[in-house]
């Protein structure tokens, strides 16, 4: 049984000539609740990258620590520039100035847990959105306990970054999902949602790169066989075309290793 919590850092790259594997860097560390003191030096500043001041809208479950890792800057800088009195108390939707930010990267924590036997892929069936907007919708319109998925992969609409992997509070707390009732999947499956309506649109190159990468990491860590990686509509008893008829299953399956 693994007992070490791992953090995975995914650097997003521009897809200029077709999909390709994104460069990655694995770093050992602890989840948000453990605080920054556990983050190793190796996760520090990446060289030769363009930095600029940006505005970040706080997503569900995001902490100053997590945001500081996403933009590769010290927590203290975020606290100081935004005059935060209590760095632990961020509000969903709050807008923060991130000084001297590196391009945003995805930080994916992996927790030892025997619960996860399947991975279910969804689309949002909306043109736009992100973890924050789906969290609001799931809380207020469906009356769920917040965002139902474990991960959301953005499509670059609105203020989002194409291919960015947002980590849901359900994943940070290792809670069951609210994304697929059929076959009891909510209690045994990791739910990943790609933003977009893939009955009309295509999965973006950056989204597919991130999905392939994320699924690859998860299935390896949790020993999930390819036969247990399904689209929502492929689950026994599910009556849906999610993740949409344009979802590129051939490409996705061929890129699984
Ligand atoms: Zn679905």
Image (cartoon, rainbow, N blue to C red):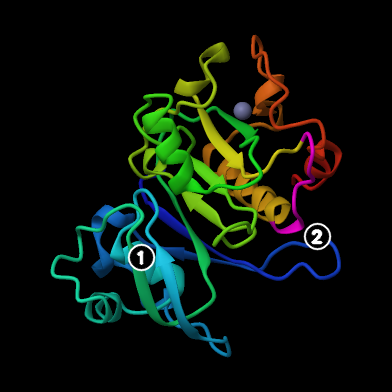
**The residue stretch that appears in magenta:** 199-206
Left or right of residue 215: residue 77 = left
Q: How far apart are the alpha carbons under marks 1 and 2? A: 32 Å
Residue where numbered disc 2 is placed: 19
Queried whether the magenta region covers residue 122, the answer comes back as: no
- Kindly identify which residue carries mark 1: 95
The prevailing secondary structure element of the residues shown in magenta is: loop
**Residue at image coords 48%, 40%:** 134
How packed is label 1: few (under 14 Cα within 10 Å), some, or many (20 or more)?
some
Residue ID at (35%, 65%): 95
Q: As rendered, which of 47 and 244 lies closer to the eye? A: 244
Measuring 43% from the left and 48% from the top, which residue is drawn there? 132
Quarter assignment of residue 41:
bottom left
Name the side, left or right, on which 82 lies relative to 215.
left
Q: Quarter for ligand 1? A: top right
The answer to which quarter of the image holds residue 168 is: top left
Question: Which residue is painted at 53% across and 67% down in the image?
Answer: 105
Q: Position of residue 162 (x, y in %)?
A: 64, 60
**Residue 1 visible from this viewpoint:** no
Please tell me which of labels 1 and 2 falls first in the chain. Answer: 2
Q: Quadrant of the N terminus?
A: top left
Does the image show residue 227? yes
């Amino acid at each position: 049984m693994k007992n070490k919590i791992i953090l995975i850092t995914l650097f997003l790259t521009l897809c200029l000539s077709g999909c390709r594997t994104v460069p990655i860097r694995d770093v050992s560390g602890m989840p948000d609740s453990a605080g920054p003191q556990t983050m190793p030096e190796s996760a520090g500043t990446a060289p030769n990258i363009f930095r600029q001041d940006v505005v970040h809208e706080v997503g569900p479950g995001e902490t100053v620590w997590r945001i500081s890792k996403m933009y590769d800057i010290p927590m203290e800088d975020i606290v100081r520039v935004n005059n935060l009195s209590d760095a632990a108390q961020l509000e969903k939707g709050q807008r923060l100035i991130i000084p001297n930010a590196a391009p945003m990267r995805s930080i994916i924590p992996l927790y030892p847990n025997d619960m996860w036997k399947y991975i279910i892929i969804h689309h949002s069936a909306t043109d736009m959105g992100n973890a924050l907007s789906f969290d609001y919708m799931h809380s207020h319109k469906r009356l769920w306990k917040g965002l139902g998925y474990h991960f959301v992969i953005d499509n670059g609409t609105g203020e989002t970054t194409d291919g960015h992997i947002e980590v849901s509070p359900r994943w940070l707390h290792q809670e069951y999902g609210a994304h697929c009732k059929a076959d009891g999947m909510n209690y045994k499956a990791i739910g990943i949602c790609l933003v977009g309506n893939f009955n009309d649109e295509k999965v973006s190159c950056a989204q597919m790169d991130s999905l392939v990468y994320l699924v690859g990491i998860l299935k390896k860590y949790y020993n999930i066989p390819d036969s247990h990686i399904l689209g929502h509509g492929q689950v026994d008893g599910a009556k849906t075309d999610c993740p949409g008829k344009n979802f590129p299953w051939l490409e996705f399956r061929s890129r699984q290793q």
